[in-house]
Image: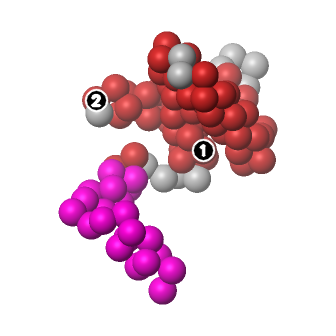
Amino acid sequence: MDTLKKIEDIINQRKASKPEESYTAKLINDGNEKILKKIGEEAAELIIAGAKEEKKQIIYETADTLYHIMVMLSYHNIRLEDVYKELEGRMGISGIEEKKRRNK
């Protein structure tokens, strides 16, 4: 998890960079719609890699997808810690039960 925290810190630092100097700054400057489009593209590539059962490509595309998700979180000023807390709150609860709780 230290790696994700380091990446989160770098993303947050790059938000202040000029878009022509940083891909992260460019994404954030382009706005939520562009970020979401990139997440969709990366997720599609991850699905294809998973369907082909190409381990190296699955790892690569997972990293790309995670990065773009983290950019979205930063755009919305959501910290990884908030996501970790949500996941921790779900531990010990079956996925079926957790889904039922969301539908109430």
Which residue is identified by label 1?
72
80 left or right of 52 in image? left
**Residue 83 belongs to magenta span:** yes
Classify the position of the N terminus by image quarter: top left
Give the spatial CA distance, label 1 vs label 2.
Answer: 19 Å
Instruction: Return the residue found at the far front.
Output: 52
SS for dot 1: helix
| Front residue (pair 30, 2) | 2
The three-letter amino acid code for the residue at tag 1 is Met
At mark 2, the secondary structure is helix
**Would residue 31 be counted in the magenta stretch?**
no
The picture places residue 101, in percent across and down from the top left corner, at 41, 79
State left or right for residue 97 relative to residue 39: left
Tell me the residue at 60%/22% (across/down).
52
Picture coordinates of residue 99, whole percent (x, y): 44, 71
**Residue at the limit of the structure toward the bottom, as seen here:** 104
Residue 99 vertical position relative to residue 67 in the rendered view, above or below = below
Structural crowding at the residue carrying mark 2, measured as other residues with C-alpha within 10 Å and reported as few (<14), some (14–19) or many (≥20): few
Residue position for label 2: 2
Amino acid carrying label 2: it is Asp
- Residue 6 in sight here: yes
Look at the magenta stretch and give its main secondary structure.
helix
Most extreme residue toward the left is 92
Residue range of the region highlighted in magenta in the rendering: 82-104
Query: Is 74 placed above or below 11 here?
Result: below
Measured as percent of width and height from the top left, residue 61 is found at 57, 24
| Colour pattern | secondary structure
Q: Is residue 31 visible?
A: no
Instruction: Give the residue displayed 69% in from the left and 17% down from the top.
Output: 21
Mark 1: few/some/many CA within 10 Å (<14, 14-19, 20+)? many
- Please count the marks in the image: 2
Circle nearer the N terminus (1, 2): 2
